[in-house]
């Protein structure tokens, strides 16, 4: 049951491993990991990772099971099949050169954190409300995305089917050796049969096909669908849709931007949590493999907020606040230039020294 739920989940796993005395990180997408147990807080405490290799006509799948409990257990098994969607029969790990040195089972003591980090998109799981797993960022807009794709196909077909053409009686063209009419352009000319063989210049000898295109109506329909995609994905109007068609009232602009702001900031927080879990796992591996002395470490996460903030407007507002005496200059440098407090104060000190000279 857990495997089936995991295969439809969103998010990704960040799994560190030791390679040649350094710690590397695998980014494992949904569908390649399968949570099988959680604790009371929803943290994944047992998970299966899947890795596939194609060798000749065989598809080899390695199953790596992590069980975080009183002791940390890792089990590895290999399977061989002729189809990617089937495990097939179990074989030794040595059947694949890259897996030959992997131990079938390892029990680790002193491991206090899972050896992986899980990034979960910060949206409620609308597929399985009982699952602590996440869903994709577009989970609520799948139907609208499909409709947008279909609408774009209609838009393209409108131009293709509405290409200008001349429908001309076959008597106007020379014939090839097989008796077929020789057309100057097969894209422009179409042949008609049975027009009572009129002569050149008579009415009905040819008809022009040049229909009125409905591109504006089709584009308006597409734009409306894209707005639904934006709304369901927590994005501001104009992110995907035509910005010129977005309503410009102050309330609507504020609400739309706030929606994007909440989505971006919540995603940043979720990513920071996953990176902290990954860092803890990397630190644990470094200790287990004696790659670095054990000790404390500090994590600082800073996200550029230019996606949700108008940097030029913020800078202008901050300059005005500094001129009013309501903001220290070092705070201005920290907010607008990304400096640390120490670097900002040093910068100000150097400027003051040069001014005195």
Image (spheres, rainbow, N blue to C red):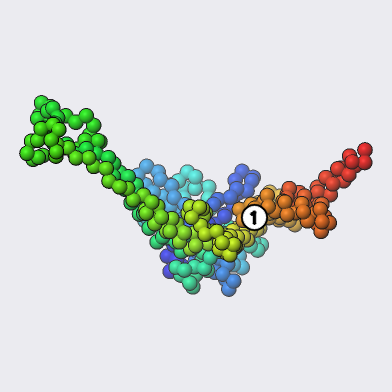
Q: Depth check: 325 or 167 in front?
A: 167
Q: Secondary structure at mark 1?
A: loop
What residue lies at 39% left-to-right and 57% top-to-bottom? 221
Side of 248 where 356 appears, left or right:
right
What residue lies at 51% left-to-right and 53% top-to-bottom? 243
Side of 204 where 220 appears, left or right:
right
Location of residue 192 in the rendering, given as x and y in whole percent from the top left corner: 14, 39
Q: Residues within 10 Å of mark 1 (few under 14, many from 20)?
A: few
Q: Residue furthest top?
A: 177
Q: Which quadrant holds the N terminus?
A: bottom left
What residue lies at 46% left-to-right and 47% top-to-bottom? 94
Q: Considering only vertical position in the picture, is 243 above or below 189?
A: below
Q: Is residue 291 visible?
A: yes
Q: Is residue 80 visible?
A: no
Side of 235 where 78 appears, left or right:
left
Location of residue 6 in the rendering, given as x and y in whole percent from the top left corner: 46, 63
Side of 26 where 229 appears, left or right:
left
Residue 287 occupies which quadrant of the picture? bottom right
Q: Residue furthest right?
A: 357
Location of residue 184 in the rendering, given as x and y in whole percent from the top left corner: 22, 29
Location of residue 57 in the rendering, given as x and y in whole percent from the top left corner: 35, 44
What residue lies at 49% left-to-right and 68% top-to-bottom? 125
Q: Which quadrant holds the C terminus?
A: top right
Q: Considering only vertical position in the picture, is 353 above or below 35?
A: above
Q: Considering only vertical position in the picture, is 333 above or below 33?
A: above
Q: Which residue is mark 1?
A: 309
């Amino acid at each position: 049951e857990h495997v089936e739920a995991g295969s439809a989940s969103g998010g990704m796993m960040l799994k560190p491993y030791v390679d040649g005395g350094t710690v590397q990180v695998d980014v494992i997408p949904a569908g390649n990991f399968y949570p099988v147990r959680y604790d009371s807080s929803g943290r994944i405490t047992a998970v299966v990772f899947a890795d596939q290799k194609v060798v000749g006509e065989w598809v080899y799948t390695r199953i790596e099971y992590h069980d975080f409990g009183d002791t940390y257990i890792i089990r590895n098994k290999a399977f061989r099949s002729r189809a990617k969607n089937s495990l097939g029969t179990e074989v030794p790990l040595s059947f694949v050169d890259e897996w030959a040195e992997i131990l079938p089972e390892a029990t680790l003591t002193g491991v206090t954190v899972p050896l992986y980090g899980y990034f979960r998109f910060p949206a409620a799981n609308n597929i399985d409300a009982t699952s602590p797993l996440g869903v994709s960022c577009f989970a609520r807009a799948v139907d609208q995305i499909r409709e947008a794709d279909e609408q774009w196909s209609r838009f393209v077909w409108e131009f293709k089917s509405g290409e200008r053409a001349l429908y001309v009686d076959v008597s106007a063209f020379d014939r090839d050796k097989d008796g077929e009419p020789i057309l100057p352009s097969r894209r422009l000319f179409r042949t008609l049969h049975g027009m009572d063989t009129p002569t050149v210049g008579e009415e009905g000898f040819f008809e022009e096909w040049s229909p009125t295109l409905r591109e504006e109506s089709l584009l308006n329909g597409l734009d409306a669908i894209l707005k639904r995609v934006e709304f369901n994905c927590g994005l501001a109007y104009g992110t995907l849709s035509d910005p010129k068609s977005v309503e410009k009232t102050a309330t609507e602009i504020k609400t739309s931007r706030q929606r994007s702001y909440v989505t971006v900031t919540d995603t940043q927080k979720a990513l920071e949590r996953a990176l902290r879990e990954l860092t803890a796992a990397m630190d644990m591996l470094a200790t287990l493999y004696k790659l670095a002395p054990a000790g404390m470490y500090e994590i600082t996460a800073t996200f550029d907020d230019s996606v949700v903030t108008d940097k030029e407007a913020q800078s202008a507002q901050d300059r005005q606040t500094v001129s009013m005496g309501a903001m220290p200059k070092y705070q201005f440098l920290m907010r607008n230039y990304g400096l640390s407090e120490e670097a900002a104060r040093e910068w100000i000190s150097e400027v003051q020294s040069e001014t005195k000279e």
